Image (tube, helix red, strand yellow):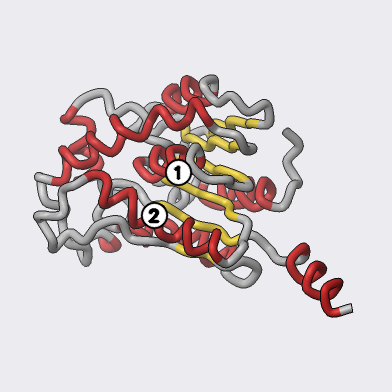
Amino acid sequence: MFNWFKKKEKVNKKPVIICIHGFGKRRTDEFIPLYENLKNDYEVIMPELYNQQFVDDRIWHNWVSRAEEKIIEAKNNHREIILIGFSMGGVIASYLASKFEIKKLILLAPAFEYISVQTASSAINHVVKKKPETISKYIPLPKEFTDTFINVVDNCKKGIEKISCPVLFIADMDDEVIPYSVSLKYYKKVPHERKRCVILAEGQHRLLDDEKTGNVAIQIIRDFIEDRIII
């Protein structure tokens, strides 16, 4: 009877959700709207990949390893994992999903292509125009971090071609940092047959914060997590 109880407990355990942030000074604060929606129903883990105050933290693999450590911890606790990555974090999440057994992968405006160094740098200074007061409290990113961002993308983007779990892409049509066409292009590279790409109208890069699309994006994410989207 004791063995039966242990087995049932394991089956009923919900997956842990690991959110990997993008290349911006807000880091995990990018996920606050999503976290508030999910926190009562799921364990949500949001590793911070770097600290703006440590200018010498410029090795790309160290940024990736800080997310990977959380996956290893969850694996050691026999937890199923749902990975969510925003922008640069989407590229990292796809790379890690190619290395580990992941239940589901969600990519939000993934930055598989930055077009140029100038576009990459714009991710540092990008400000939500209607909420400038929310940005002033954050420490700016060192300019040296731009090269690290480029190295992350260049070293991790091939992972999307080895994904073996269901994948959801969400992008905004008016994304001013990463064109939505990037999501469409890399969606086609996913070999797993269970995949879906959703393009939202009018929203911008920080799609979880955007007042036009934030609530819709969060609902789509929850529906995907809870198997209400058929793919």
Return the residue at label 2: 67
Return the residue at label 1: 96
Q: Residue at x 62, y 38 (%)?
A: 165
Q: Where is residue 156 in the image (x, y as percent from the top left)?
A: 36, 35
The local secondary structure at tag 1 comes to helix
Indicate the quadrant where residue 8 lies: bottom right
Q: Where is residue 169 in the image (x, y as percent from the top left)?
A: 54, 35
Indicate the quadrant where residue 137 lies: bottom left
Q: Position of residue 131 (x, y in %)?
A: 32, 56
Can residue 132 be seen here? The reply is no
Which numbered marker is on residue 29? none
Local crowd at mark 1 within 10 Å, few (<14), some, or many (≥20)?
A: many
Q: Which residue is drawn at 46% across and 30% down?
A: 173
Query: Between marks 1 and 2, how big is the CA–CA gap?
Result: 9 Å
Q: Do the residues labelled 1 and 2 touch (CB within 8 Å)?
A: yes
Horizontally, is 3 left or right of 105 in the view?
right
Q: Is residue 142 above or below residue 172?
A: below
Q: Where is residue 203 in the image (x, y as percent from the top left)?
A: 46, 39
Q: In this view, does 169 lie above or below 140?
A: above
Depth check, front residue: 5 or 149: 5
